[in-house]
Image (cartoon, rainbow, N blue to C red):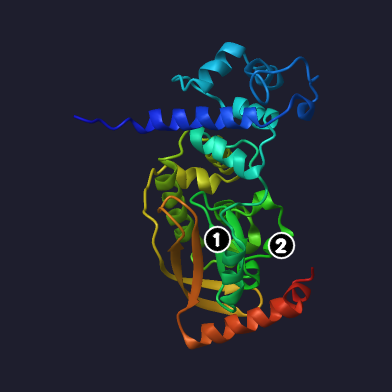
Amino acid sequence: MSTVAPASDVRRHELAEFLRSRRERITPEQVGLPPGRRRRTPGLRREEVAQLSAVGVTWYTWLEQARDIQVSPQVLDALARALLLDPSERSHLFALAGALDPAPNATCPSITPALRAMLDQLGPIPACIQNSRYDILAYNPTYGQLLCDLDALAPEDRNCLWLAFTHPQWRASVVDVAEMNRVMAAKFRASMAEHLTEPAWKALLARLEGASPEFREVWARHEVVNQGGKTKYLDNAHVGLLRVEHTNLWLGPSAGPRVVMYVPADEETRRRLERLRVLTESGQALASAGV
C-alpha cells in the first residue's frame, strides 16, 4: 500500500534541494571569500553559507537535510543575499518556505507585459490589477484618474482600503462611501483569515486602525463578505456621475490577484468614460485638477 508524503515534507525537501543547488553554483571569490585549498565539491561549503548568513552551521545543515525546523523571513532574507539569488529565485525560496518576503521586489512578477497591454487595450474602461490585500499592482490611465490621481501617490499608498478610509478625493468620488467602505472592510476581513500572521497584512491593519476612527468602528463589527461584483455610483472630479458594474476577473485562485474593471452600465457613463480617457491621454485631467 503506497502512501503520499505530506505537502510539508515535499516542500521541505524541495527547499533543501534548491538551497543545495544554489550553494554549489557559487564560487568563494563571488562572495569575497579566499579560494582556499582544492575543494572536493563545487561551490561554497555549508559553513561558509552559514557564516555569510550569520546563522549556525548545524542549523543550516539541518535546513539542507530537510529537517522540520522553523525558518523566519529574516533568515530567509539573509540566505537569499548570501546565495546571490535573483528576484525569481528569491520569490521561489520564500514560496518553498511558506513565508512572506519582508523586502519583495518592487516589480510584481505576476504583472506581465501581456497583462499591462490588456489593461491599456481596455481603453475607456477603468481597470486595475489588485491582490487580495487591495494593493493596486497596475492600472490603466482611466483608472488612474477615476477616484483620485494615483500617479501622484507613493507606491505604498496605492491601496484601495487605505485610500477609501483616508484620502479625501477618493472618498469624495464614491457615492455612499460609508456603505462601500463597510463592505470593503468586510471583504478584507474574509481575505485576511488566510493571512493572519503575515507581516504585510498585520502592518496594513495596524496602519488603518491608527489613522481612521471610521475604520476602527467598522472593523469592530467583525462582518465578513465574500468577493463579488455590483453596480456602483462614482462621482468623478473631471466628468461627473458614473454608473458602473464592478467586475472581477481572477488571474488564479480566488485568494490571488484579480483584474478589477468598472464597466459602464449605461450609454451616458460610456460617453463620460470615453471623455475621461481622452482627458487623461491629453493631460487635461491633471491640468483641470490644478496639478
- Check the image and report above or below for 17 versus 48: below
Q: Position of residue 267 (x, y in %)?
A: 49, 88
Query: Which residue is painted at 52% across and 53% down in the image?
Result: 131
Q: Position of residue 195 (x, y in %)?
A: 46, 39
* Front-most of residues 116 and 25: 25
- Check the image and report above or below for 242 versus 74: below
* Front-most of residues 83 and 43: 43
Q: Position of residue 216 (x, y in %)?
A: 51, 43
* Front-most of residues 109 and 192: 109
Q: Provide the secondary structure element on which disc 2 rests.
A: helix
Front label number (1 vs 2): 1
- Check the image and report above or below for 118 versus 277: above
Query: Which residue is painted at 54% across and 71% down in the image?
Result: 234
Q: Which amino acid type corresponds to the residue marked 2 in the rendered image?
A: Asp
Quadrant that contains the N terminus? top left
Q: Provide the secondary structure element on which disc 1 rests.
A: strand
Q: Is residue 51 left or right of residue 257?
A: right
Q: What is the quadrant of residue 149 in the picture?
A: bottom right
Can residue 210 be seen here? The reply is: no
* Front-most of residues 142 and 187: 142
Query: Which residue is painted at 54% across and 52% down in the image?
Result: 161
Q: Which residue in the structure is indicated by mark 2?
A: 151
Q: Residues within 10 Å of mark 1 (few under 14, many from 20)?
A: many
Q: What is the quadrant of residue 241 in the picture?
A: bottom right
Sequence-earlier tag: 1 or 2: 1
Q: Residues within 10 Å of mark 2 (few under 14, many from 20)?
A: few
Q: Which mark is residue 129?
A: 1
- Check the image and report above or below for 103 versus 274: above
Q: CA distance from mark 1 to mark 2?
A: 15 Å
Q: Which amino acid type corresponds to the residue marked 1 in the rendered image?
A: Ile
Q: Position of residue 265 (x, y in %)?
A: 45, 80
